[in-house]
Structure formats: C-alpha cells, structure tokens
Amino acid sequence: MSIKIENLVYKYMTGTPFEKTAIDDVSLEIKDGEFIGLIGHTGSGKSTLIQQLNGLLKPTSGKIYIDGEDITVKGINLKKIRQKVGLVFQYPEYQLFEETVFKDVAFGPQNLGLSDDEILKRVKRALKIVGIDFEKYKDKSPFDLSGGQRRRIAIAGILAMEPKILILDEPTAGLDPKGRDEILEEIRKLHKEYNNTVILVSHSMEDVAKLVDRLIVMYKGKNILTGTPREVFKEIETLEKIGLAVPQVTYLIRELRKRGIDIREDIITVKEAQEEIVRLLRRDKK
Ligand SMILES: Nc1ncnc2c1ncn2[C@@H]1O[C@H](COP(=O)(O)OP(=O)(O)OP(=O)(O)O)[C@@H](O)[C@H]1O
C-alpha cells in the first residue's frame, strides 16, 4: 500500500514554548512494498510523523493519503486505517497484558472478528516470523520471558493483524548487539515474506542502511534528504552537520580514496568492503 504526504504540519500545543512545530511542511511519497528507513536525531519528528500515519495524531494542516484515501478528512473510520497501518511503538513489550503468549498475539486478530481457524493460522505465522516456537511458548506467560522475547511477541501481535503498512518505531532500542541483529534480521525476513510496505524508524544509520530500499532523513521537523542509502551517504557533510554518522566503513572508504586508492566509492557494508579489497588485491597480483 502506498503513502502520500502533502505539506504536513504538526504543532504540539502543550510544550514549552507553548506551541512547538514538530513537523514542518513535510511532503513525501512511499510506494507500495517499499522498505523505508526513517532516520533522524532525537527530537527530529520521527515519532510525531508516524503517529499521524495511523490516525493517532491529527495533523495541524496538510494531507495524508493511504492507498489513495485521504485519512485527514473529518469522520474517517480510524479502525479501518489501523487495520491497514500497523504501528509498533518503542518498547512495545510494555504493552503486553494477556496471561499467555497465544492470547496476546491473538488479541488483534480477534478484534478484527476473524474465525478461530484464521486466528490460529495468523498467530502461528507471526510467531514463526519473529522466531518464537509456537508449541513451546503459546501457553507461557509473556512476563516469564526475556526482554528480547517479549519484544518479539509484541511485534508478532501487530504482524498477526497482517497490516499492509507496518511501521516500527526504534524496534532495537535498548537491546544488546545480538538481540538487535536478530530483530533486524526478522524484520528483513517479514518484509520478504509479506512484501508489505515497511517503515523502520531509527537513529542508527548502521542498523538500517543494509536493510532498506530508501532512507528518509528528518531534521528539525523537515525531510531534508531522501534517497537510497548510497545516495544519502554521499551527503556526508550534511549528515555530519545534523549529527548523524554514516556507517564507519563509508568513512574508511572515503579516507582510502583520498589517499589515492582506487576503491569503489559507493560501499556501505563491511561485506562489500571485504569483497572490494579482495578484488583489488587480486588485480594487483596480476
Ligand atoms: N507531547 C508533546 N508535547 C510537546 N512537544 C512534544 C511532544 N512530543 C514531542 N514533542 C516535541 O516535538 C519534537 C519532535 O518529537 P518526536 O518525538 O516526534 O521526535 P523523534 O524524532 O521521534 O525523537 P526520538 O528519537 O527521541 O523518539 C521534539 O522537539 C519534541 O520535544
């Protein structure tokens, strides 16, 4: 499902100073099935932006179209929008409340009024994607599990509703490197399996660059850069100015090129760097 945002403005009326413009005239388009990384420093407006995409916050002005439908009009059916746009909040594990894993993941599909067979199918599928063994965990209390496992179950609860657009707000926040890599790998898998539109919110370029089709970079409520990770990483000066680091390997390649080494410019992962270095060594041997 596609998303189109036109001249979006969001002002909080409760802050200090009294009025705070959190989203400042943002326009962008996301295509059906795209995997987007929404990047920006703390306070750049990422959470405010995504909460408007499922109707949780109502824009101060501007338009949002989900699959061509304007969701900013009065009287719009919010339940219908939330079936299409699934939002996984930061630290979603704190929103688990049922006494078993099964009940927690089934809660969303039950609210959609699906049959028991369909609910079971969806719960199994969602747990499989997040790497939780259905038989082993279905009757366990989520509260007896580790933080990483609880987060997966919370994500599975949203996946089980099979939203055409899935938005994850900092899904790796607070996890150790292993847990972080596992969750990111699962998000990659689920995008492949469902082929839905995914927006992954993060302030770590390193995490998202290797996964996404396109990056949207926010700064002070504005969308200041958009493009593939390779295109965005070329703007190192702009990114540095706004406090976002490009992956370390990108810096390394830049330094090597400055020293006259003829290495490909658009490398963004360590794996690509390894392959390129091997290629150069082989070439020089000849
Ligand atoms: N409830 C609120 N009342 C007033 N101002 C708010 C409120 N929530 C957010 N803001 C302000 O709006 C701006 C954007 O905040 P937002 O949470 O959308 O940024 P973010 O990029 O998601 O940050 P983070 O990475 O920390 O979640 C910030 O300046 C923030 O202080």
Image (tube, helix red, strand yellow):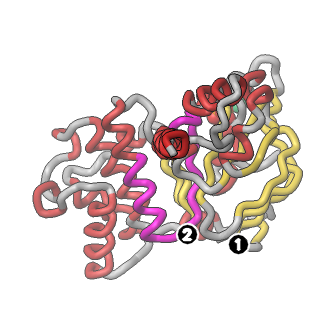
Q: Position of residue 19 (x, y in %)?
A: 83, 26
Q: Position of residue 283 (x, y in %)?
A: 54, 45
Residue 71 position by quadrant? bottom right
* Magenta residues, dominant SS class: helix
Q: Position of residue 185 (x, y in %)?
A: 39, 51
Q: Residue at x 66, y 53 (%)?
A: 214
36 lies above or below 24: below
Q: Which residue is mark 2?
A: 164
Q: Is the CB–ligand 1 distance for label 2 below 8 Å?
A: no
Residue 92 position by quadrant? top left
261 lies above or below 76: above
Helix, strand or loop at mark 1: loop
Q: Earlier in the sequence, mark 1 or mark 2?
A: 1
Left or right of 67 on screen, residue 121: left
Q: Residue at x 51, y 67 (%)?
A: 163
53 lies above or below 42: below
Asked whether 129 or 75 is in front, the reply is 129
Residues at marks 1 and 2 touching, judged by CB atoms closer than 8 Å: yes
Q: Which residue is mark 1?
A: 67
Q: Position of residue 222 (x, y in %)?
A: 81, 38
Q: Which residues are magenta?
A: 184-208
Which quadrant does ligand 1 occupy?
Answer: top right
**Residue type at numbered disc 2:** Lys
Q: Is residue 47 visible?
A: no
State the residue lying farthest toward the front.
Answer: 286
Q: Residue at x 17, y 47 (%)?
A: 141
Q: Is residue 80 visible?
A: yes
Q: Is the CB–ligand 1 distance for label 1 below 8 Å?
A: no
